[in-house]
Image (spheres, grey):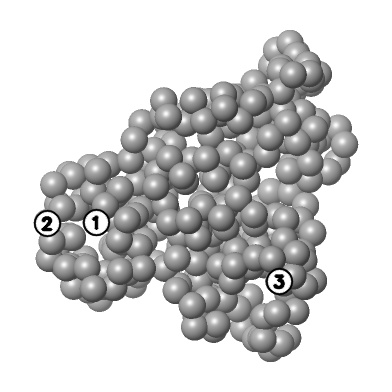
Amino acid sequence: MNEQSGSNVPGVSSAPVMALDLAQVVGQIHALPSLPAVIMELIQSLGDDDADTHVLAKKIASDQALVAKMLRVANSSFYGLQGKVTSIQDVVVVLGLRSVRTLAMAAAVTGSFSGRNAVPGFDFNAFWRHSMGTALCARALAKRLRMSEENAFTAALLHDIGRLVLAACFPAHLTAVLAYRSAHDGLLLDAERAVIGVDHAQIGEALTAHWRFPVSIRESVARHHVLDAGEHTPLTGIVHIADGIAHALELAGDATCLVPPLSSGVWDTLPLGEDGFLAIFDEVETQFEGACQMLSA
């Protein structure tokens, strides 16, 4: 492996970092805390609309930390419930199976990376704002295309999760990546490949495989940047377009982020037209701040 130049960020060691081997990354992923057992079961049930909601509520209720976070989220302004819900059973009845499954997974995933050390130049808040914006865009697209809104939201929320693995497990490598991106004024994806030899999409695929997400979601995470018309699943296409829209709308509030290239072939396959996309932009911008409050609840 080749040595790469170190970071120029003030206060951070400039010692060179080595390019990463994907096997190293997988090893660190396996050392991360596992998701709660009930979340792993929920992941396995994605797409199963016949799951027993009473059994689901009982299983979630066994994890008190997860229950507390879900109740905060369910009572946030995003859902706009008329009365306060006080139990998981109430949440399941009021929001429905799909929303509860998505809510529980979002709570667990964000919680698994909370409390990590800061990495100079990496804005965790901006990261989650972009992830939520992409998830809302993907859900809006899926609704209009009559696809699973739950799968679209989940895949899009996780699309950049590999960057959190870098922040948690390889902070010096991420610092070097950010310095390279700043010096070359380019895409973070290109900086990752140039400095460490792997990118966040590959790392995200490894993490979602470790968490046993369905193949369709893992593929969407792995391929959301590189698509050719006719060589992608509809879900991957939705996440690809949603990512571009979220960047273009500047939802993260991060001035250093550039809009990644969009596949015209994928864009042209979406039968929405200008009015359809404008409606999606309006819908996402209306929901966005409330959704971010939900994620941080």
Q: Residues within 10 Å of mark 2 (few under 14, many from 20)?
A: few
Q: In the rendered structure, which disc, 1 or 3, sits on the residue that comes first in sequence? A: 1
At x 73%, y 43%, the residue is 189
Q: How far apart are marks 1 and 3 (CA)?
A: 42 Å
Q: How crowded is mark 3: few (under 14 residues within 10 Å), some or many (20 or more)?
A: few
Under circle 1, the secondary element is helix
Under circle 2, the secondary element is helix
The answer to whether the residues at label 1 and label 3 have Cβ atoms under 8 Å apart is no
Task: Between residue 254 and residue 194, name the one nearer to us.
Answer: 194
* Camera sees residue 133: no
Under circle 3, the secondary element is loop
Q: In the rendered structure, which disc, 1 or 2, sits on the residue that comes first in sequence? A: 2
Up-down relation of residue 212 to residue 220 (above or below): above
Up-down relation of residue 45 to residue 112 (above or below): below
Quarter of the rendering containing residue 178:
top right
Asked whether, in this view, residue 295 is left or right of residue 238, the answer is left
Checking the image for residue 58, the label placed there is 2
Disc 3 marks which residue? 230
2 vs 3, front mark: 3
